[in-house]
């Protein structure tokens, strides 16, 4: 093997004084910290707050969907008399809630929160680096994320309401300020917030890529990296290649809104006026949007898959099955994710021939996905499964990845998409595979690496309670949605009561809302467990899960520079669990090979 | 009240957590110190996972049994049968895969949860297995792709028939309008510049262009007056009029652009009767979309303002309506509305009427943007459409 691994000399010369906590003030340690661990935690806590807001919004609109026309003090309490007079939700606010719920969960929780937390925490730790390549950029990345979160929340308080054209903000609805109240100032703030978010994401991603390529410890060749790092690396590359396209997409929309250009507008007769802007096309927006939008799905999913690969292997006490096949399938998924965006646009009036091409590439993604699933199943086969809360979530994600991935075969098939495009079938599909799936990966990560973050353990019993409430909630909420979709119920409808066609299925909506409320209550169990354990949790040991990766060779207290002495050297891949010839069922990466031992994997 | 409920919920959660915590401390005191997760706990969770699997499978079965009747009745269009077949094949494949992989997963969890003395089997990879589960999905997917794409091309590339109905569906916030081609089987040209109160679809005839020019100039004159007034108000320090002024100015500039476009039309096509061919005999229907059984309907879709999507659930048809662009879809109804009631009843399904619904978020009343569809026998259809005035007559006020 060639020596890709870099020596520790180059690491800011920290080796002789691994930590200098003595000069840190409160502000430099907890607020403007440049330490990857603290930044990871900042991302995580911000994401938890955003997730609670996003979830709360979903409860408000689920109440409306289950009992249209009923008055809810709950809605009135949060939205006030303007948007929920007497607790009766306003249709414009309904659309705004749907929009901001989607935006928050997709971008702020599952992109910023997931990658931000775990890439920051794990890349330096698992590679044997003192910190990220650039601590300053990393800090700026978090603070841009924080500012964009604040702007997004602030947009909910403007007079005309927040953006309400759906999280995909298709123009002309989002471009004409009077087309819907939310397309006024709310939309402007949405675009500003997203632009800052993209800057944050790019700074983060560039940092991750540079760190992975340059700061691996001695012996850490590419094929000795844990799958988590592989997934973070590929995610970061996806982000760097696709987020700029979303930025240009948003900028052009700003121009159309504010400076009279016509990138997305043409032949519009709105409220008695033939608009001056002609020659643009909303399809251009859709292409640009989904050129990010589809890789975005994998920007969300891949880190979660990386986390559960590690969690499943460690807790099965067994090497991940088909390590190289896992890497190749992640690469294949990442590559294909760039050439499938058109499957969101089969029914947009795009040339049907393009539909043919995109169906082909889309269904191909099922092959690497199937390989991943089978490899996970082969990993738990004949394992010694330690069903810790993290493992429960990891297995739950495998289940959701199967359930949600399979319905993708229907949506990705252009001919079948004709009849279920934009129905609840789609809502069920992507919430299971991408929403809940990635959230499960995130929970697996939090439960597993909590001792690494805080030196204490979360309470397992509450973890199990949280898991069962969540998985039952997820299946209870999103599985019935497939039936609504097959009954032809369109998404983003304020109420289905107008239609004879959909009257019969109203009781399904009541069931869904019931499960949604239960799942939401379950999340408070997690929040309690999380914050309580930070201060009062049981003290962790250095390597509580008897894991092989390098982060567990660092001392429990989180010091600047991670290792007080020299950085550990790596001698083997990270999955030597239950290797024959060893007494223990794990062999950390820093343990040299025995004489005559082959590294073969 | 809401606050009280909220506080109660939080307190309940906290109370549960406290109980769990004290239980946990008690367990710790009892000596189960070594592991962070105890073997007995793992056994319970392994059992719960299997129980969850059984409940999940049962409930999926119950849902399919109880809610199967809400799935749309069989297709009311000819091409829809092909889609339904493809759907059934794909769905069966999905269900089989779902049940097999989940059964395997739950079985492994139950069989291999951690026990004292159990050792994991060293099995890092196996090329044959990996080949097998690459190649088998690849073959299955390639056949699915081939089947899917042949269906897609059958649906999207339908040869026009001699007696097909050519019609246009125009979407705007929040209503639908239908235009039939009339006797010449040709839809006349349209342009958004010619939209006026009496020509809501912007159909182009020599007369409609002239009249919209008159209209546009009237607008310009009015706007020029109000710009002047607002301008002097702003100059004299009236606050709060700036927005109104800039609004009027942009409207004025929009109508001036419209005037230029209309003049261009007039200049280029003044003597060009062929250019306006096909418009006069178009028929506009505003309350119902009529279709004829067994006669192909060739749809053109347009939108006047924002994106909409024309979704015909019973006909397995859908197409977005895009401002600035025409989009197309073709289908042939198989049953009249009356016949469909019997078909649905024979499948144990509820059917009241065919509907066209908007399926792309378009504003506050998106959820109410619907249009009834009535499929008639060919004879009834012809008779029905003939009761409507042609556009030419309507516009001339006849």
Image: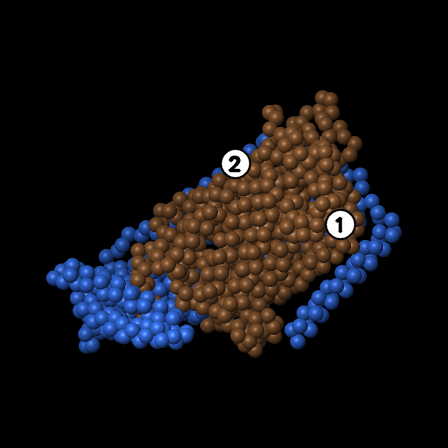
Distance between mark 2 and mark 1 Cα atoms: 43 Å
Q: Quadrant of the C terminus of chain A?
A: top right
Disc 2 crowd rating (10 Å Cα; few below 14, some 14-19, many 20+) is some
Instruction: Look at 37% across and 47% down and name the residue there.
Output: A354
Determine the colour of chain A: brown
The residue at which mark 1 appears reads as: A457
Question: Which numbered dot is residue B345?
Answer: none
Residue sitting farthest toward the right? B30
Q: Looking at the picture, how far across and down is residue A299, in whole percent?
A: 54, 47
Q: Looking at the picture, how far across and down is residue B342, in whole percent?
A: 42, 67
Q: Looking at the picture, how far across and down is residue A517, in whole percent?
A: 63, 65
Instruction: Look at 60% across and 39% down and name the residue there.
Output: A133
**As drawn, A589 above or below A424:** above
Residue sitting farthest toward the top? A596
**As drawn, A400 above or below A217:** below
Report the chain holding disc 1. A
Can residue B308 be seen here? The reply is: no
Instruction: Look at 79% across and 57% down and name the residue there.
Output: B21
The reply to whether the C-beta atoms of the residues labelled 2 and 1 are less than 8 Å apart is no
In the image, taking residue A102 as reference, residue A351 lies left or right, namely: left
Q: Residue A169's image quarter?
A: bottom left
In the image, taking residue A26 as reference, residue A132 lies left or right, namely: left
In the image, taking residue B373 as reference, residue B1 lies left or right, namely: right
Q: Looking at the picture, do discs 2 and 1 lie on one chain? A: no
Asked whether B107 or A101 is in front, the reply is: A101
Determine the colour of chain B: blue
Q: Residue A105's image quarter?
A: bottom right
In the image, taking residue A426 as reference, residue B312 lies left or right, namely: left
Q: Looking at the picture, how far across and down is residue A375, in whole percent?
A: 61, 39
Disc 1 crowd rating (10 Å Cα; few below 14, some 14-19, many 20+) is many
């Amino acid at each position: 093997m060639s020596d890709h691994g870099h020596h520790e000399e180059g690491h800011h010369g920290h080796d002789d004084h691994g930590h200098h906590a003595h000069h840190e003030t409160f502000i430099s340690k907890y607020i403007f910290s440049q330490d990857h661990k603290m930044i990871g935690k900042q991302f995580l806590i911000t994401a938890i707050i955003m997730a609670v807001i996003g979830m709360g919004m979903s409860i408000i609109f689920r109440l409306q969907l289950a009992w249209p026309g009923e008055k809810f003090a709950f809605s009135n309490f949060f939205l006030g008399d303007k948007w929920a007079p007497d607790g009766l939700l306003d249709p414009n606010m309904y659309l705004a809630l749907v929009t901001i719920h989607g935006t928050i969960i997709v971008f702020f929780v599952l992109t910023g929160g997931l990658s931000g937390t775990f890439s920051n925490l794990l890349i330096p730790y698992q590679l044997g680096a003192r910190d990220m390549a650039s601590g300053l950029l990393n800090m700026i990345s978090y603070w841009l994320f924080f500012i964009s979160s604040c702007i997004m929340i602030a947009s909910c308080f403007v007079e005309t309401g927040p953006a309400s054209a759906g999280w995909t903000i298709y123009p002309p609805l989002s471009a004409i300020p009077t087309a819907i109240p939310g397309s006024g100032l709310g939309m402007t703030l949405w675009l500003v917030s997203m632009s800052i978010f993209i800057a944050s994401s790019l700074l983060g991603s560039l940092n991750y890529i540079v760190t992975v390529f340059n700061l691996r410890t001695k012996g850490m060749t590419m094929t000795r990296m844990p799958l988590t790092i592989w997934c973070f690396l590929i995610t970061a590359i996806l982000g760097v290649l696709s987020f700029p396209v979303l930025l240009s997409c948003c900028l052009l929309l700003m121009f159309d809104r504010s400076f009279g250009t016509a990138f997305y507008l043409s032949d519009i007769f709105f409220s008695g006026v033939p608009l001056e802007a002609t020659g643009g096309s909303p399809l251009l927006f859709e292409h640009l949007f989904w050129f990010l939008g589809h890789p975005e799905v994998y920007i969300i999913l891949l880190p979660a898959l990386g986390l559960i690969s590690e969690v499943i292997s460690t807790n099965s006490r067994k090497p991940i099955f088909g390590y190289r096949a896992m890497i190749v399938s992640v690469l294949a998924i990442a590559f294909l994710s760039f050439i499938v965006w058109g499957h969101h646009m089969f029914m947009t009036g795009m040339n049907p021939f393009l539909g043919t091409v995109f169906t082909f590439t889309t269904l191909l993604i099922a092959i690497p996905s199937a390989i991943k699933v089978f490899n996970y199943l082969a990993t738990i086969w004949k394992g010694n499964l330690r069903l810790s809360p993290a493992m429960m979530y990891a297995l739950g994600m495998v289940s959701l990845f199967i359930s949600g991935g399979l319905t993708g075969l229907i949506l990705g098939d252009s001919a079948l998409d004709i009849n279920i495009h934009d129905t609840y079938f789609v809502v069920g599909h992507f919430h299971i595979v991408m929403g809940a799936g990635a959230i499960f990966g995130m929970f697996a990560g939090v439960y597993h690496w909590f001792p690494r973050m805080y030196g204490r353990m979360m309470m397992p019993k509450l973890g199990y309670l949280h898991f069962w409430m969540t998985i039952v909630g997820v299946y209870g909420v999103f599985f019935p949605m497939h039936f609504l979709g097959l009954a032809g119920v369109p998404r983003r409808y304020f109420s289905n009561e107008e239609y004879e066609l959909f009257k019969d299925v109203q009781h399904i909506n009541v069931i869904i809302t019931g499960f949604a409320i239960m799942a939401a209550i379950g999340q408070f169990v997690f929040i309690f467990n999380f914050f309580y354990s930070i201060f009062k949790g049981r003290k962790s040991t250095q390597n509580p899960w008897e894991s092989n990766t390098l982060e567990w060779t660092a001392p429990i207290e989180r010091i600047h520079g991670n290792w007080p002495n020299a950085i550990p050297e790596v001698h083997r891949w990270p999955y030597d669990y239950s290797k024959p010839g060893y007494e223990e069922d794990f062999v950390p990466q820093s343990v040299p090979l025995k004489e005559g031992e082959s590294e073969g994997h | 009240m809401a606050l009280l409920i909220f506080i109660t919920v939080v307190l309940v959660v906290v109370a549960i957590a406290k109980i769990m915590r004290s239980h946990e401390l008690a367990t710790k005191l009892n000596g189960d110190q070594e592991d962070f997760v105890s073997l007995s706990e793992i056994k319970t969770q392994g059992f719960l996972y299997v129980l969850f699997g059984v409940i999940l499978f049962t409930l999926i079965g119950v849902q399919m049994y109880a809610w199967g009747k809400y799935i749309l009745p069989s297709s009311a269009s000819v091409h829809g049968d092909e889609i339904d077949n493809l759907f059934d094949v794909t769905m069966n494949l999905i269900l089989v895969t779902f049940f097999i992989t989940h059964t395997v997963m739950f079985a492994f969890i139950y069989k291999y949860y951690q026990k004292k003395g159990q050792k994991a089997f060293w099995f890092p990879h196996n090329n044959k297995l990996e080949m097998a589960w690459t190649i088998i999905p690849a073959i299955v997917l390639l056949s699915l792709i081939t089947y899917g794409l042949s269906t897609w091309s059958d649906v999207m590339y339908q040869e026009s028939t001699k007696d097909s109905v050519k019609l246009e569906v125009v979407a705007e916030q929040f209503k639908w309008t239908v235009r039939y081609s009339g006797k010449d089987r040709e839809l006349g040209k349209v342009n958004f510049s010619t939209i006026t109160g009496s020509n809501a679809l912007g159909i182009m005839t020599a007369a409609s262009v002239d009249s919209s020019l008159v209209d546009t100039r009237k607008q310009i004159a009015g706007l020029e007056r109000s710009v002047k007034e607002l301008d002097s108000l702003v100059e004299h320090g009236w606050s709060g009029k700036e927005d109104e002024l800039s609004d009027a100015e942009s409207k004025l500039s929009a109508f001036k652009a419209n005037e230029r476009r209309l003049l261009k039309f007039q200049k280029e096509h003044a003597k060009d009767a062929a250019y306006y061919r096909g418009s006069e005999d178009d028929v506009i229907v505003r309350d119902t979309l009529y279709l004829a059984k067994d006669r192909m309907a060739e749809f053109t879709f347009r939108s006047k303002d924002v994106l909409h999507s024309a979704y015909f659930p019973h006909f397995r048809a859908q197409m977005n309506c895009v401002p600035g662009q025409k989009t197309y879809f073709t289908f042939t109804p198989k049953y009249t509305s009356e016949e469909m009631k019997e078909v649905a009843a024979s499948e144990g399904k509820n059917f009241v009427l065919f509907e066209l619904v908007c399926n792309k978020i378009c504003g506050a009343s998106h959820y109410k943007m619907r249009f009834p569809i009535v499929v008639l026998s060919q004879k009834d259809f012809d008779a029905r459409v003939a009761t409507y005035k042609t556009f030419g007559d309507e516009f001339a006020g006849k």
